[in-house]
Image (cartoon, rainbow, N blue to C red):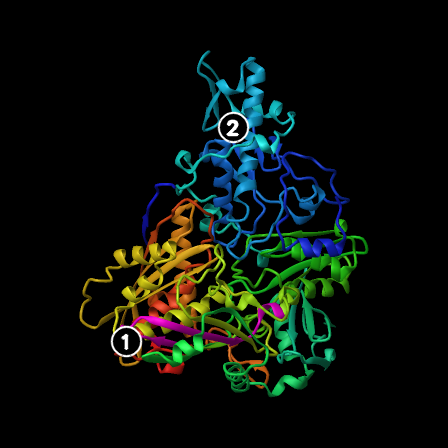
């Protein structure tokens, strides 16, 4: 891994209320307020120290416990958030540890820690301010305690790494000696809190040790699937393989006599589960269980029928809206000196988390608990309450580290619902539900399938005078959040093509521009997949831009630079990657370059890929990726996220969840290829923060990986573009 970094800075809720709020960040600032705990919800331990406020506990030995709300799934969110608090607290990082809490504990204190979900690269960019304010408030209270002890003004005190000094008198004390007194003081008025300027950062912008490395290295870290409770039973589940189908019947007598089998139960209208004293016994009995399904009306659906529906959306006038309609696109293209047209397509893809879906549930008449690896423990708690009918204060969701999430473990809580439904049938007995890999890939919430038709017009000088693109595909909102579709318009599917600045802005300026979306839904459930719609949208546009540049007889970089002149941050990362990637430098014989840029999740990214082509075998030798995320909290973690993005982006080049007879065909890794170690290229990261905004880092870079590689492949093929994924449909494969 090579990292290049520019570090110069520039009260009680109803169930419905909670279900809604659990996916949204709350407003306002709450510091140090203590509310009575909800019934049966244990108070959060102070771990032998004094709670200064909700975010900070200080122990007598000067060690600081920082409380973290967001979920951790390997991305380093816990360490990054702790850095935010520690920077303002001005404690000794070597003495920092973490403490997490449950949604029940958060509710008991009126959600003082706010949003607990991790997704959309929001963990740091949406909580940085109030988290830093929590650290700053704790520092102010500790200094106030020292000032009171010495009878001096607070303004005369200094603090560094938890050591408080009064230069005028030479007095010195430590946070650990002040904590008990500080904990008794009122929280400062939020209006009096001033956060440090980036130029004064000592912890932020650096890459200190991660706080969760040791248990991962020594194997002591316990994931959700590792949960073990006394008297626990294991459950294996099978749902109708055709989406929309039903469970008709099953013959439990055929497996109940097997060793260790406790029960065979109907879970809901679609699924049946086997309980046993081990997962293997439950799984093998389920495989032997005679089951009759009603496949329903979707059993005739296939990838071919879905593709036909999408192709119809490319030209139809029905259920289409224009998000951008500037100038007269039709006239500009029709009157152009040269026209370029193309259709690109991207498939359903699975999340394929290494830890399959699982949840352990225990339900009694007056208490319900789940142990679940969730990106949104509050949503898990809401799902548990909904299934059991118990009040929120009588439910709890414990949130161990995740073995991958990527959007699958966020808003969709189907595995929590199933585990609770099973546990309800065996009151007091803990039930660990584990999905097999096959079940996990058969009943995913896939990245939406899509097609895009693009047309461009060039004048005699090769300048782009008109661009028209129409995306035809499935809507995530239509499946999971229809209230976000306003007047029949779902802007989410055009992520990365928006005029609006700040989140996923289109960087190109074209005098005549039209961007449309044709919603064409299928029976296949869809949801966020790491990077969501920026992934396929970047493929469509950035690969087409290379086609247009080629038609104009211009260098792909130079062609893009002209169109990005009004968006300096887009242009900045493009120039950064071109410089580091040596775009203008010749390559060894047989190697070819491709370039791409895009914006998503508040950050600007670009990539250069180097590939070679031997027959139909594609080898990716090198990827250089640049990102501007505004403030770079931890450069090494950012680079690690970029590396993970490369793996995911390369997955999207070769993976596909296809449909036949209404069901998913690829049900395990023997037919669903993901990036292998031998396929991974040399990765170089250029981190170029401008220190004037807060962007995400977990997802933005994924979207430029695939188009950069595809453009390099096109260059290797003498200008023949790759328009259909996965690569196997073009007769290509990664090696």
For the residues marked 1 and 2, what is the alpha-carbon distance in whole angstroms? Answer: 71 Å
Q: Quadrant of the C terminus?
A: bottom left
Residue 403 appears left or right of 246: left
Q: Is residue 39 left or right of residue 91?
A: right
What's the residue at 47%, 54% (across, down)?
602
Report which quarter residue 642 is drawn in.
bottom left
Residue most extreme to the bottom: 300
- Give x and y (percent) for residue 499: 48, 61
Viewer can see residue 268: yes
* Residues drawn in magenta: 455-478
Element carrying mark 2: loop
- Return the x and y of residue 268 as percentages of the image width and height: 73, 72
How many numbered discs sit on the rendered protein? 2
- x, y percentage for residue 440? 57, 70
Q: Quadrant of residue 407?
A: bottom right
Whether residue 474 appears in magenta in the rendering, the answer is yes
- Where is mark 2, residue-wise? 62
């Amino acid at each position: 891994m090579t990292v290049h970094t520019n570090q110069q800075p520039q009260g009680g809720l109803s169930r419905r209320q909670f279900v809604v709020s659990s996916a949204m960040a709350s407003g306002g600032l709450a510091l140090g307020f203590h509310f009575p705990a909800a019934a049966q919800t244990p108070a959060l331990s102070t771990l032998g120290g004094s709670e200064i406020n909700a975010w900070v506990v200080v122990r007598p030995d000067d060690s600081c416990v920082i409380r973290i709300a967001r979920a951790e799934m390997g991305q380093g969110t816990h360490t990054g958030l702790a850095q935010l608090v520690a920077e303002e607290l001005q404690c000794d990082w070597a003495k920092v540890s973490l403490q997490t809490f449950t949604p029940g504990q958060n509710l008991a204190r009126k959600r003082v820690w706010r949003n607990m979900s991790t997704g959309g690269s929001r963990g740091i960019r949406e909580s940085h301010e109030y988290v830093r304010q929590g650290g700053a408030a704790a520092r102010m209270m500790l200094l106030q305690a020292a000032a009171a002890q010495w009878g001096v003004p607070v303004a005369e005190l200094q603090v560094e790494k938890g050591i408080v000094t009064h230069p005028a008198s030479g007095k010195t004390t430590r946070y650990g000696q002040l904590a008990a007194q500080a904990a008794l003081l009122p929280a400062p008025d939020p209006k009096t809190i001033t956060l440090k300027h980036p130029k004064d950062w000592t912890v932020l912008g650096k890459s200190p040790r991660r706080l969760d490395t040791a248990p991962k290295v020594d194997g002591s870290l316990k994931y959700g699937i590792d949960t073990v409770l006394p008297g626990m039973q294991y459950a294996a589940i099978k749902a109708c393989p055709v989406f929309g189908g039903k469970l008709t019947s099953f013959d439990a007598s055929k497996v109940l006599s097997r060793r260790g089998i406790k029960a065979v139960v109907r879970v809901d209208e679609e699924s049946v589960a086997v309980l046993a004293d081990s997962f293997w016994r439950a799984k093998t009995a389920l495989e032997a269980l005679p089951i009759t399904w009603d496949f329903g009306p979707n059993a005739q659906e296939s990838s071919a029928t879905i593709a036909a529906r999408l192709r119809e959306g490319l030209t139809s006038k029905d259920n289409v809206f224009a998000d951008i309609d500037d100038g007269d696109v039709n006239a500009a293209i029709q009157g152009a000196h040269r026209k370029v047209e193309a259709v690109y397509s991207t498939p359903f893809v699975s999340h394929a988390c290494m830890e399959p879906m699982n949840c352990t549930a225990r339900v009694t008449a007056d208490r319900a608990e789940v142990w679940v690896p969730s990106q949104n423990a509050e949503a898990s708690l809401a799902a548990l309450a909904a299934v059991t009918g118990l009040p929120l204060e009588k439910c709890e969701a414990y949130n161990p580290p995740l073995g991958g999430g990527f959007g699958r473990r966020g808003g969709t809580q189907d595995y929590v619902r199933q585990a609770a439904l099973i546990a309800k049938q065996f009151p007091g007995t803990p039930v660990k539900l584990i999905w097999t890999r096959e079940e996990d890939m058969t009943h995913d919430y896939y990245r939406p399938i899509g097609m895009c038709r693009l047309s461009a017009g060039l004048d005699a000088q090769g300048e782009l005078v008109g661009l028209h693109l129409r995306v035809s595909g499935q809507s995530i909102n239509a499946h999971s959040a229809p209230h976000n579709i306003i007047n029949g318009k779902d802007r989410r599917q055009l992520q990365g093509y928006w005029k609006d600045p700040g989140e996923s802005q289109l960087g190109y300026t074209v005098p005549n521009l039209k961007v449309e979306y044709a919603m064409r839904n299928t029976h296949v459930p869809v949801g966020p997949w790491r990077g969501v719609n920026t992934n396929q949208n970047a493929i469509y546009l950035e690969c087409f831009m290379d086609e247009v540049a080629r038609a104009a007889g211009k260098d792909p970089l130079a062609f893009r630079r002209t169109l990005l002149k009004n968006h300096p941050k887009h242009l900045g990362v493009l120039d950064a990657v071109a410089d580091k990637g040596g775009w203008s430098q010749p390559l060894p014989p047989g190697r070819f370059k491709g370039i791409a840029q895009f914006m998503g999740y508040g950050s600007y990214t670009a990539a250069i890929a180097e590939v070679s082509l031997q027959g139909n075998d594609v080898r990716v030798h090198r990827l250089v990726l640049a990102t501007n995320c505004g403030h770079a909290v931890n450069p090494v973690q950012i680079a690690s996220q970029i590396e993970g993005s490369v793996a995911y982006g390369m997955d999207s080049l070769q993976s596909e969840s296809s449909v036949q007879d209404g069901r998913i065909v690829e049900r395990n890794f023997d037919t669903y290829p993901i990036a292998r170690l031998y396929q991974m290229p040399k990765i170089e990261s250029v981190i170029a923060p401008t220190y004037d905004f807060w962007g995400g880092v977990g997802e933005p870079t994924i979207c430029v990986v695939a188009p950069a590689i595809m453009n390099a492949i096109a260059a290797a093929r003498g200008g023949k573009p790759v328009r259909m994924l996965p690569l196997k449909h073009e007769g290509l494969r990664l090696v």
